[in-house]
Image: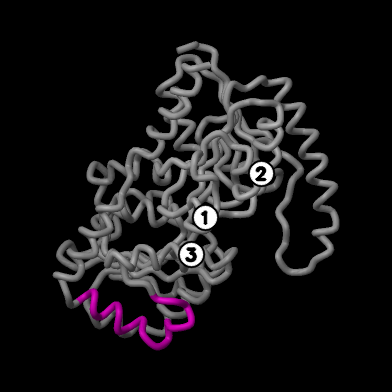
């Protein structure tokens, strides 16, 4: 294998696009000696801060996403897209990559599209059961389309689809080697730990549901780790006690997963891939504020194999307490959900994706 391979990885907008990109980058570093790697993101988006923290150079395009509701910002989208195409062209002819990878989000569209036009081999990775707009458009040009779900041929050309699963950070796969944070939080060791995740920004509906049922939760003599998001922290920090830990954001998610017995979370693709690896019983509450309601589709596919409990936001006030009560009381159900979700885990996604890349480059 040549020692001077150059790679571009592009994706962003959400952690669900950014962390798979970083995971793939780390795997590329293990497999290609002295390779050069450049990240491409969108100016002003979260990838511009997250990627450098993992040791990678990133360059931002002017591109921004299409707002689904009417807004004057959409008027400038064609101009930004045109400028981003020019930026992408200049990046490619200057950097001269051997391979380009897109992990979704609008930042990936210009760079992968221009790469394909210039006959540079490309790969896109789609995390969800319903693809985003960028990957749907790019699938017509990409050499490889790596997915996490079956029956994706209704969205993508079947001949280019490879089911690899979603790349996750290496540390998630090693949670048994992480710390148990119950001692750090002064939790009693023998109590069930419920982890509540509303995403980095938090979820008002999940937070209000927990608030509404807090007396019930306390009555169950459990420990709670409640990640409510920065926006909502001041509203809920007064619930902090010996058995309830309230926080804006969880830095050490690996140890937190390791210490938890039941997880209440959204059903973004990356979260589901992590839950499959850590194999914990969960109540999934899909966000209704996503394109084509794909989180509900994600959760339903998991629920169909009896690997989670799915509760839609519109039903939370009616059945949340009953579902949590069921999970707390029924150890057999908890074990069954854990076992079933572990069977869909695909821990080698990053490696499988990089093997496709290696094979392609070795045949050039």
What residue does disc 3 label?
295
- Mark 1: secondary structure: helix
Q: Along the horizontal axis of the image, is 220 left or right of 55?
A: left
What residue is shown at x 44% (from left), y 76% (from top)? 312
Q: Is 326 in the magenta? A: yes
Choose top left, top right, bottom left or bottom right for residue 188.
Answer: bottom left
Residue behind mark 2: 107
Secondary element under disc 2, as helix, strand or loop, is loop
* 220 versus 73 height, above or below: below
The local secondary structure at tag 3 comes to: helix
Residue 126 seen from this side: yes
Name the quadrant containing residue 132: bottom right
The x, y position of residue 16, in whole percent, is 51, 51
Quadrant in which the N terminus is drawn: top left
* Residue 159 forms part of the magenta stretch: no
Could you say where residue 199 lies in the image, as x and y percent from the top left? 48, 61
Q: What is the C-alpha distance between the residues marked 3 and 1? A: 18 Å
Residue 242 in view here:
no
Crowding around mark 1 (Cα neighbors within 10 Å: few <14, some 14 to 19, many 20+) is few
Q: Earlier in the sequence, mark 3 or mark 1?
A: 1
The residue identified by callout 1 is 154
Q: CA distance from mark 3 to mark 2?
A: 21 Å
Q: Pinpoint residue 47: horizontal percent, then vertical percent.
A: 60, 44
- Check the image and report above or below for 338 versus 39: below
- Against 227, residue 172 (above or below) is above
At which x and y percent is residue 242? 29, 69
Q: Main secondary structure of the magenta part?
A: helix
């Amino acid at each position: 294998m040549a020692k001077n391979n150059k790679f571009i990885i592009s994706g962003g907008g959400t952690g669900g696009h950014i962390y798979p990109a970083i995971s793939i980058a780390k795997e590329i570093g293990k497999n290609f000696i002295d390779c050069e790697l450049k990240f491409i993101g969108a100016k002003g988006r979260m990838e511009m801060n997250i990627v450098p923290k993992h040791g990678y150079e990133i360059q931002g395009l002017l591109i921004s996403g299409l707002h689904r509701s009417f807004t004057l910002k959409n008027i400038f989208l064609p101009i930004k897209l045109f400028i981003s195409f020019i930026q992408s062209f200049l990046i490619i002819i200057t950097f001269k990559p051997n391979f380009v990878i897109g992990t979704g989000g609008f930042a990936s569209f210009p760079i992968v599209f221009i790469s394909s036009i210039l006959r540079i081999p490309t790969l896109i990775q789609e995390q969800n059961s319903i693809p985003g707009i960028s990957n749907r458009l790019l699938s017509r040009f990409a050499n490889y389309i790596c997915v996490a779900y079956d029956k994706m041929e209704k969205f993508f050309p079947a001949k280019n689809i490879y089911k690899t699963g979603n790349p996750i950070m290496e540390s998630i796969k090693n949670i048994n080697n992480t710390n148990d944070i119950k001692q750090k939080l002064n939790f009693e060791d023998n109590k069930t730990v419920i982890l509540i995740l509303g995403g980095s920004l938090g979820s008002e509906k999940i937070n209000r549901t927990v608030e509404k049922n807090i007396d019930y939760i306390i009555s169950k003599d459990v420990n709670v780790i409640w990640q409510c998001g920065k926006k909502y922290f001041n509203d809920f920090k007064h619930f902090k006690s010996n058995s309830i830990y309230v926080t804006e954001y969880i830095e050490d998610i690996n140890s937190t997963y390791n210490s938890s017995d039941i997880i209440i979370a959204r059903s973004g693709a990356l979260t589901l891939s992590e839950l499959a690896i850590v194999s914990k019983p969960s109540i999934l509450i899909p966000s209704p504020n996503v394109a084509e309601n794909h989180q509900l589709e994600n959760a339903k596919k998991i629920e169909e194999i009896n690997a989670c409990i799915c509760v839609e936001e519109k039903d939370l006030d009616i059945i949340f307490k009953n579902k949590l009560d069921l999970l707390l009381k029924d150890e057999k159900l908890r074990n069954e959900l854990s076992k079933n979700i572990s069977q869909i885990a695909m821990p080698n996604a990053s490696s499988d994706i990089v093997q496709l890349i290696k094979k392609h480059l070795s045949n050039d």
